[in-house]
Image (cartoon, helix red, strand yellow):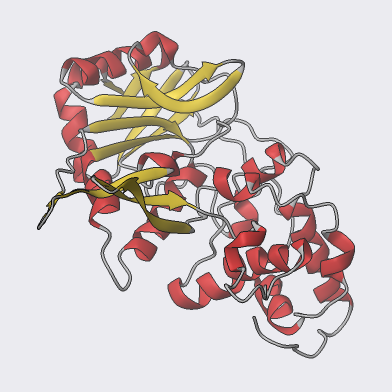
Amino acid sequence: MAMLLAKKNLRALLRGAMDRKYRVVGPVREHGIVLFAEMSDPGALCLDELNTQNSIKEFFFPKTEKLFTYSLGKNDAAVADDFAPPRTVLIGGRACDARSLVALDRLFGWDYKDKFYFARREATCVITLACDRFDEACFCTSLGFGPRAAEGSDILLVPVEGDEYAVEAVTDKGRALIAEVKDVFTEGTPGAEKVAYPEKKFDLAAVKPWLERNFEHPIWKEEFLSCLGCGTCTYQCPMCHCFDIVDEGDIHGGARCKNWDSCQFALFTLHTSGHNPRPAQAARWRQRLRHKFVYYADKFGTEACVGCGRCIRNCPVCLSILDKLVLIGREAAAAPAQPAGAQP
């Protein structure tokens, strides 16, 4: 027998978590936009949209966070670090969101283990929903996985006939939460799965070789002139992870903070001398694609993109990474790659 959750009991699941002192994060509608946000009322859960405008990244790697605070005395200094993340249930992410966490685990545990990120990961139970629909910006299948992939989830809810979810407990953390709120679940035989798979749009295996060999290809100037450098694509991407560290305070003390940054900003690579090795937006977009599909893949064995489509839906000038990947696939199939140019 399988474990089932009636859709009408979804909010009861959240209420049970709240009653047990979990912080609950999920999709809510704020000012007409559906966002992941902390919830105080399970009734605020909004699953009307395919996906949220922001990603789950910010609940593990916040926009800004204090690494420590400090106070300065006449002859001494005091430092305090009292970081303790709350137990959290994060619900409503999709397979693409959960997959991004697996990739970020590799990054933040690479040469230095980021204790802030991993403390939040350990404190959070991720409940993912398999997708029963998709739009023109979705391309998870082109990246080698699909809308019901369980990787990165603690609990996967798969929509099935009968207005229910089939419940897959993926990790011990997920099984522990299910045991805590077991009254909302039932046992039975699930109906047919209602999962929607986007069409595969490009050949992923062709992208990396083409990018490696075409650093100076005309495509960069021809296709990316409209980019404004606003950083929307990187801030809403569940995989982009650039940050800066600054001290914020005065002569009496302050805090050392980690703040999001973006390779799409002109200041990101501006040297003190005034030289900028990426002086134009085309070069910054080239860096974005090469980082996602070449550099990150070389280091961690997977792409730094999960096909969620947020950067496409929210770009103010409608630049689509999917369109560019499709174009690169056509270029790779149509002609031999050009010789490699200078490296960044």
Q: Residue at x 73, y 53 (%)?
A: 322
Residue 43, percent across and down? 40, 9
Q: How many marks?
A: 0
Tell me if residue 190 can be seen. Answer: no
Looking at the image, residue 141 lies above or below residue 50: below
Given the current orientation, which residue lies at the most extreme bottom position?
339
The residue at 55%/75% (across/down) is 295
Quadrant in which the N terminus is drawn = top left
State the residue in front, 171 or 101: 101
- Locate residue 66 relative to residue 173 in the image: left or right: right
Note whether 6 is above or below 336 in the view shown: above
User: Looking at the image, which residue sits at the far front?
Assistant: 74
- x and y percentages locating residue 316 in the rendered image: 76, 39
Q: Front-most of 327 and 194? A: 327
* Residue 334 seen anywhere in this rendered image of the structure: yes
**Residue appearing at x 15%, y 20% in the figure:** 20
Q: Is residue 24 left or right of residue 319?
A: left
Q: Nearer the viewer, residue 148 or 323?
A: 323
From this view, report whether residue 262 is shown above or below residue 45: below
Residue 283, how many percent across, how many down?
A: 74, 69
Q: What residue appears at the point 23 percent right and 21 percent down from the top-left corner?
A: 17
Quadrant location of the C terminus?
bottom right
> Closest to the observer: 86 or 211?
86
Q: In x, y percent, where is residue 53?
A: 58, 32
